[in-house]
Amino acid sequence: MSLKCRNIGVVRCLLLIMFLLVGGISCGGIEKAGEVDRTERLRERVSGFLEARNKSNLEEMRKFYLEPGQARVGNVMVRDGKIESLEIEEGELKAQVKITASMVAMGFTFKNVPRTQKWIWENGDWYIDPLGAATGNPFTSKKGPKVEDEKLKK
């Protein structure tokens, strides 16, 4: 075999190695670009939920719940919802989102009503935490009334 053939083999080998190195580096970059910035994704999801809620679009709201049947529109219209703050906690698996919105109920408009929503990271995306929803009657006491007046004890 001549020296010229040997050099062509070396050049091909070097080109192959360079191709593999460049390809490996670029694939590594693609993989990192595919990673999700959870804070930005949470902001996108909350904004999407508020937009669906503002329009009372039940079908669209269902996309933000792990169990789509949990989505409710009810008789309270929510308008002009906006994000006040996002706080991600516990290893980026849970978040608290403070929002304000105007609410219309029975002909009355309540402006800038604050609300805290809890979101969880499941299946590669953020969803409203079903356990973080307010439940029960906020006007009752779990311990019962404290009676200090002797007349009321009888």
Image (tube, rainbow, N blue to C red):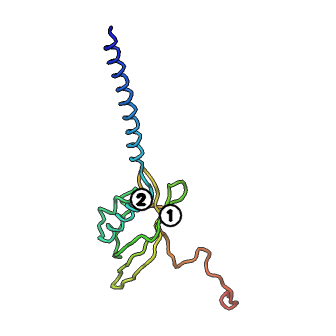
Residue 67 image position (x, y, % from top left): 39, 56
Residue 37 image position (x, y, % from top left): 43, 54
Residue drawn at the location 55% of the way across and 56% of the way down:
90
Residue drawn at the location 49% of the way across and 71% of the way down:
136
Residue 46 image position (x, y, % from top left): 39, 64
Q: Quadrant of residue 107?
A: bottom left
**Residue 88, placed above or below residue 15:** below
Q: Residue furthest top?
A: 1
Query: Marks 2/1: CA distance?
Result: 12 Å
Which mark, residue 152? none
Label count reads 2
Q: Nearer the viewer, mark 2 or mark 1?
A: 2
Nearest to the observer: residue 43 or residue 60 = 43
Residue drawn at the location 38% of the way across and 30% of the way down:
18
Q: Disc 2 on helix, strand or loop?
A: helix
Q: Residue furthest right?
A: 150
Amino acid marked by disc 2: Glu
Q: Disc 1 on helix, strand or loop?
A: strand
Q: Which residue is mark 1?
A: 87
Residue 101 image position (x, y, % from top left): 39, 76
In this picture, residue 47 sits left or right of residue 86:
left
Q: Which residue is mark 2?
A: 40
In this picture, residue 128 sits left or right of residue 89:
left
Instruction: Bin the neighbour count of mark 2 within 10 Å (Cα to Cα): few under 14, some 14-19, many 20 and up.
Output: few
